[in-house]
Amino acid sequence: MPLIVPPLTGHDVDLVVPATLQGNTTEERIGRRLTVTEPYVTRLTLDQLSELKVNPALLASASPDDDYFVVAFVCTFRPGADGDDAPFKDARIGIRLSAPGEGPQPVALALSPDTASAASGNSLRFALSVPLGFVEPSVEYATDGSQEEQYITAYGLGSGDPEWLLREVPGHPLRGDVLLAVVVRAPAGAAVRAEVIVAASLRKLKLLRSRADLPPRLHTIDLPALARPALLGAPAEELPAGTGQ
């Protein structure tokens, strides 16, 4: 049973390249290369998580008294409107989960996608594991013996600071829309927050490492305050694109 993500409002954000002793002596800002949407947040019950195929091993110790959320958003990597075609080499997208006090803290129960790979050469082979049912895996097996390379890898399952590493691989540049989602378990009634951090490297004459300057509405997510009713049950192929203008 897939979870429907409605159209989300996207915001262009600047990439900030910090000043360094060996490089630029002043901070550089790169605009209109990255769009991040406002998050979609919904509450789910423990039974609904089972229907969405969250790993049963992680649900074994879960309690129906805990709170469960899904947080989803889209990052769009695009060429510059001013002709800036410096390619993205890699990107890291992290979520730092926290709740007040010294008691139990929120953790990630599932990450979507958790991996994606492409074969070098003309053929692509996607290996998507999507526990939330957002999209159906699309697999095209490479027949030319090309080596596969992962271009999306998720880390931090079961922790409070999950992240995704995205990178370009031969024949598969880092560009376009990427829908990311995390299932969060939190103590009941906790004022749980998720802080989003996006960093990216662009390849010009040299490698430029930057961090996205996210406004507060994109950087700090108050899960209980933003949670909407869950929309379940649509066939995966009918899911909306998930981005807005």
Image: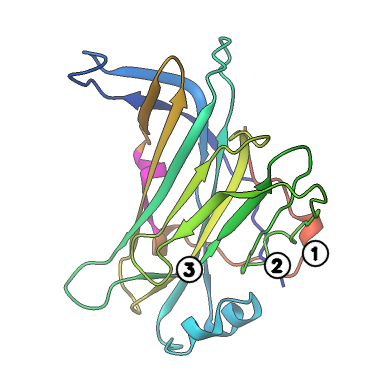
Q: Which residue is mark 2?
A: 2
Between discs 3 and 2, the one toward the N terminus = 2
Q: Which residue is mark 3?
A: 69
The disc labelled 2 sits on which kind of residue? Answer: Pro
In percent of width and height, residue 150 lies at 58, 50
182 vs 26: above or below: below
Classify residue 179 as left or right of residue 36.
Answer: right
The disc labelled 3 sits on which kind of residue? Answer: Phe
Gap between marks 1 and 2 measured at Cα: 7 Å
Q: Which residues are magenta?
A: 216-222
Q: Residue at x 63, y 41 (%)?
A: 243
- Could you say whether the residue bearing mark 1 is in a helix, strand or loop? loop
- Could you say whether the residue bearing mark 3 is in a helix, strand or loop? strand
User: Is mark 1 in CB contact (under 8 Å) with mark 2?
Assistant: yes
Within 10 Å of disc 2 (Cα), the crowding (few <14, some 14-19, many 20+) is many
| Of residues 78 and 215, the one drawn nearer to the viewer in this rendering | 78
Query: Is 219 in the magenta?
Result: yes
User: Is mark 3 in CB contact (under 8 Å) with mark 2?
Assistant: no
158 vs 166: above or below: below
- Could you say whether the residue bearing mark 2 is in a helix, strand or loop? loop
In percent of width and height, residue 206 lies at 40, 19
Q: Residue at x 65, y 46 (%)?
A: 242
The disc labelled 1 sits on which kind of residue? Answer: Pro
Between discs 1 and 2, the one toward the N terminus = 2
Could you say which quadrant of the image residue 99 lies in? bottom left
Classify residue 97 as left or right of residue 163.
Answer: left
Q: Residue at x 57, y 76 (%)?
A: 54
In percent of width and height, residue 153 lies at 51, 54
Gap between marks 3 and 2 measured at Cα: 15 Å
